[in-house]
Amino acid sequence: MNSAGEKGRWGAGGGRGGRHAVVVGGSLAGLLAAHVLAGHADRVIVVERDRLPDGPQPRPGVPQGRHPHVLLQGGQVAMESLLPGFLAELREAGAPRVGMPSDMVMWQTGRWFRRLPATTHIYTGSRAQLEDLVRRRVLANPVISVLEGTDVVGFLGDASRVRGVLVRDRSGDARAESRPLEADLVVDASGSGTKAPQWLAAIGAEGPQEETIDTGLAYASRVYRGTNGALDGETRGYYAYPDPEQVHAGGALPLEDGSHLVIVSGLRGDEPPTDDDEFVTYAKRLPHPLLHRWLDEAEPLSPAFGFRRTANIRRRYDGPGHPAGFLATGDALCTFNPIYGQGMAVAAMSAVALRDALADRRRTPTTRRVQQALLAASRLAWDISAGADRKMPGAVGTAIDGGPADQVAGWYLSRVQERAPGDPVVGRAFRAVLTLSAPVTALFAPPVARAVLFRAPAPTPTEPPAAPEESGARA
Ligand SMILES: Cc1cc2nc3c(=O)[nH]c(=O)nc-3n(C[C@H](O)[C@H](O)[C@H](O)COP(=O)(O)OP(=O)(O)OC[C@H]3O[C@@H](n4cnc5c(N)ncnc54)[C@H](O)[C@@H]3O)c2cc1C
């Protein structure tokens, strides 16, 4: 892609009868990118290594799908703008819409959140269901086709331009030959384990600089049906966030069938077990026995699944010297520590950025400009997860050292965190930023800054609050 504004302006088209785009990976970022590109290409081929299920089923290419996947407000807005009516479909399919902080029992930095009226909502249904709905909507477009059960194993092209991909059937035949699939644009949406840096190197093209911050956080998740009523009715879920003093996190979030997906997490060296009994015992490490007691009585409905690759990784393709005709998006561009629940939202926000960059009539959408727009779409999420993870004990990586400005911001943010659970004004701004629906500057708006700089933290409940506060407490 040198220029790719609209049909007719995009790439050479070669002898293939039109402009072709190839998207590597048919998960959320790939599907949403394909949806946008279909407005600019004659043909979009999504190459996906899995055989795609005919319904909301987990699949091997997305092992994280067994773990909680909340859709934050910023992602909801982006999804709806890409696929109008999507949120109504999600609700119709039964995905719980949970109000924050009213519907949840939440703990952070030594405090319980007051259950004030909701200022934001999250969707907590299963990852498989959400992906299934996106897949159905996107693949209904006849411009888009999927090459299932097929691996991308390399790129075509040279240092100046990526001209397609090499694909190989996953037939199980190790001798199967790879074959070329030419394209005017290749989009890498193959997730955090992307091999694009190696494939670029193999054609002599410049790869990315990588920024990493790894806390060694590990997850274990398991589905339960509650029996003691603590997470029914007005209390729909529970969440305890980690911080440098309390490094364990845990939560129970409602799924579409009335069960809860429970997660416990810990850092390197104290990873949560996937053994059935030990999973429950591990919940004792949380700052309050609520989740442990609930688990002790609840009925497990699945085995426990673990997950350990949770480093923040940002691949910088936005500088000069990278080949034309290649973009990276989703986790392949920027992977976040999943504890902050941002990746799907950023995949959707990136697709909106792609759409807007390609539609911008004032500026030629060069590869570099579009890649910069994709990076910008992930910046807030990166600042949140990298900023928080830098402070965690044992964190390692190339981007671990923040500058002096980060230290001042860190001081201010820790005061925000102390006040968010009890102060309605600070809490609203904090949630807006954390759910990617307001920029960080929302935390510096005058009423918020006054509370953060000059007021002591407001009192918070001494025990997990069992019910939402009355509307009289509205901010
Ligand atoms: C434990 C965990 C919990 C998470 N929780 C949340 C959450 O609460 N909220 C949230 O918003 N996000 C969450 N995320 C992040 C979220 O899963 C991703 O950001 C999201 O799936 C978008 O990723 P993606 O489409 O870029 O990549 P992925 O979803 O990882 O998909 C990559 C796709 O590429 C395919 N592929 C890979 N290599 C090849 C190849 N060579 N050839 C062909 N196909 C290939 C794979 O099969 C897969 O389909 C979580 C992540 C993890 C790990």
Image (tube, helix red, strand yellow):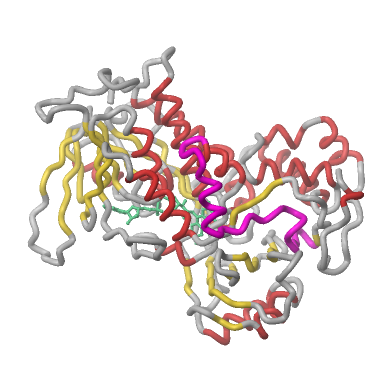
Q: Which residues are magenta?
A: 81-110
Residue at the image position 91 percent from the left and 39 percent from the top: 454
Indicate the quadrant of ligand 1 in the picture: bottom left
Residue at the image position 66 percent from the left and 36 percent from the top: 438
- Residue 264 position by quadrant: bottom right
Q: Farthest residue in the top direction? A: 362
Q: Is residue 109 magenta?
A: yes
Location of residue 465 in the rendering, given as x and y in whole percent from the top left corner: 83, 65
Decide: is 466 above or below 336: below
Q: Nearer the viewer, residue 18 or 458?
A: 18
Decide: is 195 above or below 183: below
Residue at the image position 27 percent from the left and 45 percent from the top: 46
- Residue 51 position by quadrant: bottom left
Q: Is residue 144 left or right of residue 90?
A: left
Residue at the image position 74 percent from the left and 37 percent from the top: 443
Location of residue 302 in the rendering, given as x and y in whole percent from the top left corner: 49, 78
Q: Nearer the viewer, residue 246 or 57?
A: 57
The quadrant of the picture occupied by the N terminus is: top left
Q: Is residue 349 left or right of residue 112?
A: left
Q: Is residue 308 left or right of residue 400?
A: left
Question: How many numbered discs?
Answer: 0
Q: Is residue 61 magenta?
A: no
